Image (cartoon, helix red, strand yellow):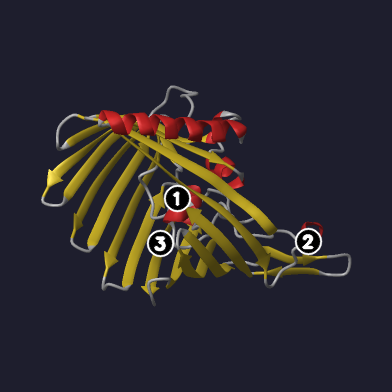
Amino acid sequence: MKNLLTLIFTLSTIGLMATTQGDTLKISGSIDTYFRTNLNSTNDPENGGILAPGTSFANLPGFSLGMVNVLGEYESGKVGAVADLVVGPRGAEAVFGSAAPLNLVNQLYVYYQATKKVKFTLGNFNTFLGYEVISPASNFNYSTSYMFSYGPFSHTGLKADFDLGSGFTGMLGVFNPTDATDFNPSFDFVYGTQLGYEKGDFGGWLNFIYDDANEFTQVDFTGGYQATEKFYVGLNATSASDNFYGAAAYLQVATSDALAVGVRGEFFADEGVGVIGEGESVFDFTVSLNYKSGNLTIIPEARIDALSSELFMVDATATNLAMSKNLSSFVLAAVYSF
């Protein structure tokens, strides 16, 4: 933590120097913490089985920590660099492929704007697949979906982004094996591409990755439409060969400048990834409130995960063994963005 604070101070000093030289330095980030409890299951780890949904983050019992996230972005003319550091349980889980102290690094890359329509990026960056992201400050729901949890988190490699005109964008990339962020352990490579379209209040992105060594393919669509000033609709659908497939809808309504309510409904089928059991499926339904006061967002959230079989062990004592298809839970989270 001391090293992180030293880095923040150093970046701030560089930022003051950069401003006088015409370059730009932007520092942003977030801090999050939460409380979580089960509503229809024991919260005692000695007398229960699966005590949380099988998704990433926000799954620890009682009062728990998320992460400190500090993002530094430096730009000078056509070139720039990004350093994104994380500390805490959420950050460690996001960068699970790295050993300490490299698990502090969530993103680390440089870029070159070759022309107005072509940009090259080299390094480690968060994935382009999926609707949700690692930083809770950029998600409406605090807990995450199954599709996000078992898709890639990050890639390390080289990508080229293209402005194709008329609202269309494209991307081509070559990466290390998924989530091998520090180096390539096998010298096998993963190939990715994206076709996007944004115009007015609509945006849609078709994403594709291919791993030749493991004969793995994932196709993913992410879209969003701001139907009115206060009503937003999001969609994510994905299929990963011999692993999983699923779809999720996101509906959000702003009732005022400070308060919004959002729901996520997701269907997820396990075809071999092992989170539920091969041939099993789950439907999760999440209702979240976002109350904003300045840079602070308070998120009360209720969630139910309904499995296709009785796989949740909701109670396991000397006199009782209770299994259920459903797990209901509640989260109260606080996210501060800066």
Q: Amino acid at mark 2?
A: Asp
Badge 3 crowding class, 10 Å Cα cut-off, few under 14, some 14 to 19, many 20 or more, is many
**Mark 3 / mark 1, whichever is N-terminal:** 3
Where is residue 131? Give x, y as percent: 38, 55
Gap in angstroms between the C-alphas marked 3 and 1: 32 Å
Report, in whole angstroms, how far the alpha carbon at label 2 lies from the one at label 1. Answer: 36 Å
| Closer to the camera in the image, 24 or 218 | 24
Q: Nearer the viewer, mark 2 or mark 1?
A: 1
Residue named by callout 3: 247
Query: Marks 2 and 3, how far apart in space?
Result: 32 Å
Q: Amino acid at mark 3?
A: Ala
- Residue behind mark 2: 44
Residue drawn at x 18%, y 62% is: 200
Q: On the rendered structure, is 188 left or right of 59?
A: left
Task: Name the residue beneath numbered marker 1.
Answer: 338
At 76% across and 61% down in the image, what residue appears? 48
Which type of secondary structure does the marked residue at label 1 adopt?
loop
User: Residue 170 occupies which quadrant of the picture?
Assistant: top left
> Where the N terminus falls, by quadrant?
top right
